[in-house]
Amino acid sequence: MTIELSPVGVACQLACPYCYEHPQRDAGNYSAGYDLDAMKQGLLREGGSFSLFGGEPLLMKFDDLTDLLQWGYQRFGSTSVQTNGALITPAHVALFARYHTSVGMSLDGPDELNDARWAGTVEKTRAATAASLQAIDWLVDAGMVPSLIVTLHRGNASAERLPRLLSWLRDLDARRITHVRLHALEVDHEAVREQLALSDDENVAAFLACYHLQRELQTMRFDVFTDIAQLLLTGNGGSCVWNACDPLTTPAVRNVNGVGSRSNCARATKDGIEWVKSVGHGIERYRALYETPYADGGCQGCRFFYACKGQCPGTAIDGDWRNRSEQCRVWYRLFETLEDELVKLGRTPLTLVAAERRALEGRVLSGMQQEQQHGDHWDAPDGFNHSDGAYVVHGDAGTTTMHGDHSDAA
């Protein structure tokens, strides 16, 4: 579970066409401002360390940012921030170091690979990208290695651009970047699909290229592959997209807005309304998916259901959380690949043990899975480690939340 603080709401100095917060922007659901005291009271009600989130949280006044991070450090010992990085200055780096604030950055590559993170013109976009890359260097040099979220799309992971993306990832590995979260493009507008979406085959090719690249990297790991292996072997753990999220209460994310009110993960908000968080957690989506035929948007009969659970409701077909993810074919093929890899390593995924698979499906449908979705200890099988494509994890080690999809701050 992550506590997110969104002082500026969905406001951002960039205009990334694929941002999952666009439904709120389209509805005019912008913050009218923030109240430091109200936010602190809201955070105290949540009772734990928080991650600054947006939009772009560094749009805050620097003095107010200092106040919040100092307060968070004194109360909870640490904080984190998820940012596009373009507004980071040396003063921010010093502030983050002083108050033990870990940094997660959302960036899709250098130069033209990051053009989807649009700043109004090509020149301004490239300048913002250069500023984000400079921020990585400042943070690394200060001993505050950031983690990254990289969204795969036509601008950085098409067949002609994928080699450049892989080369950049190698360079980041040499700079001691350790945690990278790979996102499949989330599509909320058909224009974005036409402009940036990869085909299912292209998505699979890009993910698998990163999976194979990992074998030659020294420190960098892509957590999606460890998530999938862990889920295949145990049915537990991984980030929030695999854990039967209820879009009306989003248990992995408790958001506090600029006036201290509690709300849900914005990724699941498709009608533009910042709904108040529901009190109880429901599994209606997962009961429906389990019983609904594939042709009707469900998961009926899928042997990966206990692990995938229809994936994130924020990526559901037609924006309707009752459906499975529209990225189903991509995830299915990645589960197949990791299933084969585990078998080669002498491990038996639960997908291949019918009785245990049915028992796990029953746990999902009874809601028991939610009690163990975070923090479970899991060690990679022998051979499934740095040289073979994954790494040992403990729950969601190395991250503070699960998306940006949320933040991915180490």
Image (cartoon, rainbow, N blue to C red):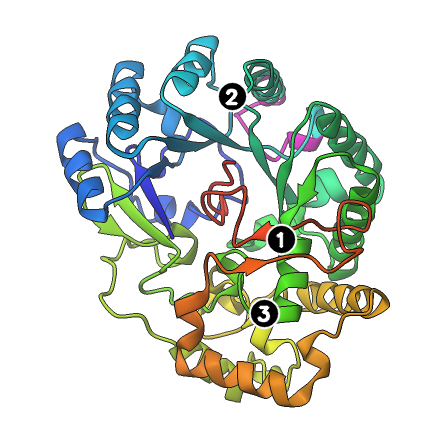
- Callout in the foreground (3, 2): 3
Q: Is residue 293 visible to the viewer in this orientation of the structure?
A: no
Residue tagged by mark 2? 86
**Residue 168 location, x and y as percent?**
75, 29
Front one among 19 and 276: 276
- Callout in the foreground (3, 1): 3
Q: CA distance from mark 3 to mark 1?
A: 23 Å
Residue tagged by mark 1? 193
Query: Which of the 4 image quarters holds residue 151?
Result: top right
Which label sits on residue 308? 3
Hey, what amino acid is under mark 1?
Arg
* Neighbour tally class for label 3: few under 14, some 14-19, many 20 plus, Cα within 10 Å: many
* Neighbour tally class for label 1: few under 14, some 14-19, many 20 plus, Cα within 10 Å: some
Residue pictured at 63% horizontal, 90% vertical: 355
> Is 123 on the left or on the right of 171, as rendered?
left
Up the image or down, 324 lies above or below 30; here it is: below
The residue stretch that appears in magenta: 113-125
Up the image or down, 64 lies above or below 215; here it is: above
Q: CA distance from mark 2 to mark 1?
A: 26 Å
**Residue 15 location, x and y as percent?**
49, 34
